[in-house]
Amino acid sequence: MKYTYYFCIKTINVMRIVSRSTLVLFYKKHADAETAIEEWFKKTEKADWTCAADVKQSFSSVDSVGSQHYVFNIKGNDYRLVAVIKFKIKMVYIRFIGTHNEYDKIDSTNI
């Protein structure tokens, strides 16, 4: 007797974030940011973004600054997070996290 097995493979499309350790190191220095950063991380990790409009739907205050770079306001704009988002491969690369004053000193499109 011959058996045929069929398997359903369900792909889960979620964003992968590189690197969480950058966020943890930051909020160890800035304890007041921990809750907001963790909320950003959880919301981003569960997202299934395919374009900038999807990001904007999740975070209404996000700004696209070009070259796949996005600036997120963290904790009511006390802190800024710059990430490169690669929609096709579902990756979010943390490029910068800092205070608003530190952010003003960088070029967010090339960091």
Image (cartoon, rainbow, N blue to C red):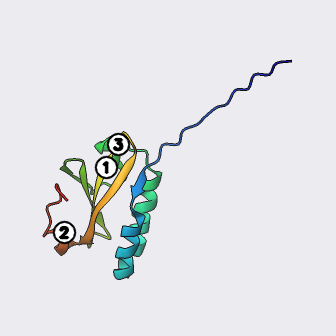
- Give residue 36's position: percent from left, percent from top: 39, 69
Q: Using the numbered discs, state the Cα–Cα distance from disc 3 to disc 2 in whole angstroms.
A: 24 Å
Question: Where does label 2 land, which residue?
Answer: 103
Mark 3 and 1 residues: CB-CB less than 8 Å, in contact?
A: yes
Which residue sits at x=35%, y=44%? 54
Sequence-first tag of 1 and 2: 1
Question: Where does label 1 land, which residue?
Answer: 85
Q: Amino acid at mark 2?
A: Tyr
Q: Residue furthest front?
A: 1
Sequence-first tag of 3 and 2: 3
- Give residue 50's position: percent from left, percent from top: 36, 40
For this rendering, which residue is in front, 17 or 63? 17
Q: Quadrant location of the N terminus? A: top right
For this rendering, which residue is in front, 72 or 97? 97
Q: Using the numbered discs, state the Cα–Cα distance from disc 3 to disc 1 in whole angstroms.
A: 6 Å
Question: Where does label 3 land, which residue?
Answer: 87
Which residue sits at x=67%, y=30%? 7
Residue 80 seen from this side? no
